[in-house]
Image (cartoon, rainbow, N blue to C red):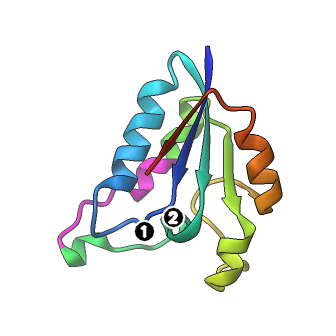
Amino acid sequence: MKNVAIIISTPPHGNAKGREALDTALALSTFNHISVFFMGDGVFHLLPNQHPEKILMRDYIATFNMLELYDIEEVYVCKTALDERNLSQIAFNIPNQQIEITQFHQLLANQDTILRF
């Protein structure tokens, strides 16, 4: 079993990277220990009440709730990214742990594989 980090740093709509990251995390969780990191604009995946259908995009954001069902419990959010986007006081759509950038680097040092989306 390998430790795999999935880093999501792109916004949720306008490209397929977030959906690909989610699909990858769920698929790899069967045989690996997965940690998911939301960095930069990736923190926008965590906002509730999004309506991507208005821009003709598929609503996959609710599927992030599947992380817990797949025993992916290590979900980290960059506190700096939240602060920079004035999102620190928002209630997010999935359970997570807010971490500082130094903690992020420490956690990444323990990973066997790092995938960035």
Callout 1 touching callout 2 (CB < 8 Å): yes
Say left or right for 49 vs 105: left
On the image, the x and y values in percent for residue 65 come to 52, 47
Q: Is residue 61 magenta?
A: yes
Circle on res. 49: none
Residue at screen point 74% across, 32% down: 110
**Residue bounds of the magenta highlight:** 56-64
Residue at screen point 62% across, 66% down: 92
Amino acid type of the residue tagged 2 in the rendering: Gly
Say left or right for 79 vs 43: right
On the image, the x and y values in percent for residue 107 come to 76, 42
According to the image, label 1 marks what residue? 11
Q: Is residue 53 above or below residue 85?
A: above
Mark 2: which secondary structure?
helix
According to the image, label 2 marks what residue? 42
Q: CA distance from mark 1 to mark 2?
A: 5 Å
